Amino acid sequence: MTAPQSPPERSNRASTDLPLQDIEGGDQPSAGKVVGRRGRPSVEEAQRLPARILEAGWEVLRDHGFEAFTFDRVARHAHIGKATIYTRFAGKREFLEALLAQKMVERRLRIMKLGEGLPLIEAFCIRAAAVMHVLHSPEGLMMERLVDWCDQEFGNGEMNYRQAMYVDALTNITEELEEVSREQDLTIADPELAARFWLEGLLGHARLETSTQTVDVEANEKWARAYSEFFFAGLRHSGAISAPSSPLSD
């Protein structure tokens, strides 16, 4: 299972300052709040319905826990009939796979939006701090529980949800490095290997931090910048990355 790999839309904006609620998803309306007239849904409402159902499922997991997750509760949260859920999701496994994929895409797009138009190192400094923040947030911790639960309930020798998440993240970071290198006239000898080192460093630090009693947000942000600068300095020193006409951080 891998999430769709839709690339984020790019812009020429240099500003990347977003409040933390934008990183976490912002103040979104409850899945149970349906906008529009009663009766047969409009085409627009019908198109939004699967996402609204999935968001209701996320609320059920958040409010009642994984063991108490049922389609009856999802239907009540979404203010729809349970049969409507079954017309779009064959069962609990398909529903939770779709929910996990949706949350992965949402998180990736929010993080990738940060740093648009900035030099490579600065963009990755900002994104590293955002990754640390998201992984330690309530939503991030719930995502971790969802992945573990899916692996426990549905995983087998051929299906591992955590590995699928890793491969998805690795693919997207590799593509981002390749795209940025083209845009900023850089040469990266092995973008996939660079992406692997980058990702595993972030995940390793996040795991160590979550093992402590409290998470120091300011310290994590300082670590993210130091890690990013050290990482790209190492690539540059080894010749794995080069800028033919200007320093990377100019």
Image (tube, helix red, strand yellow):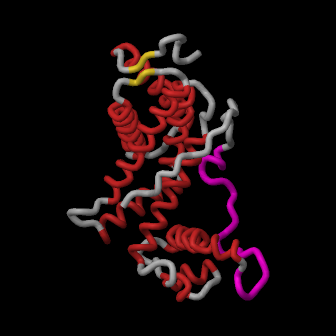
- Return the residue nearer the eye: 215 or 56: 56
- Return the residue nearer the eye: 158 or 47: 47
- Return the residue nearer the eye: 155 or 246: 246
Magenta portion: prevailing SS class: loop
240 over 75 or under it: above or below? above
Where is residue 225? Give x, y as percent: 51, 27
Q: At 38% from the left edge and 35% from the top edge, which residue is drawn?
A: 195
Q: At 76% from the left edge and 85% from the top edge, which residue is drawn?
A: 38
Q: How many marks?
A: 0
Residue 40 belongs to magenta span: yes
Q: Is residue 148 left or right of residue 85?
A: left
Where is residue 184? Give x, y as percent: 54, 23
Q: Is residue 43 visible?
A: yes
Q: Which residues are magenta?
A: 20-41
- Return the residue nearer the eye: 3 or 59: 3
Q: Is residue 236 left or right of residue 34?
A: left
Residue 14 belongs to magenta span: no
Q: Residue furthest left?
A: 157
Q: Is residue 201 visible?
A: no
Where is residue 227? Give x, y as percent: 44, 27
Quarter of the rendering occupied by the N terminus: bottom left
143 over 51 or under it: above or below? above
Q: Is residue 180 left or right of residue 190?
A: right
Quarter of the rendering occupied by the C terminus: top right
234 over 54 or under it: above or below? above
Q: Is residue 207 left or right of residue 137?
A: left
Where is residue 33? Give x, y as percent: 71, 74
Q: Quadrant of residue 146?
A: bottom left
Q: At 28% from the left edge and 66% from the top edge, which residue is drawn?
A: 155
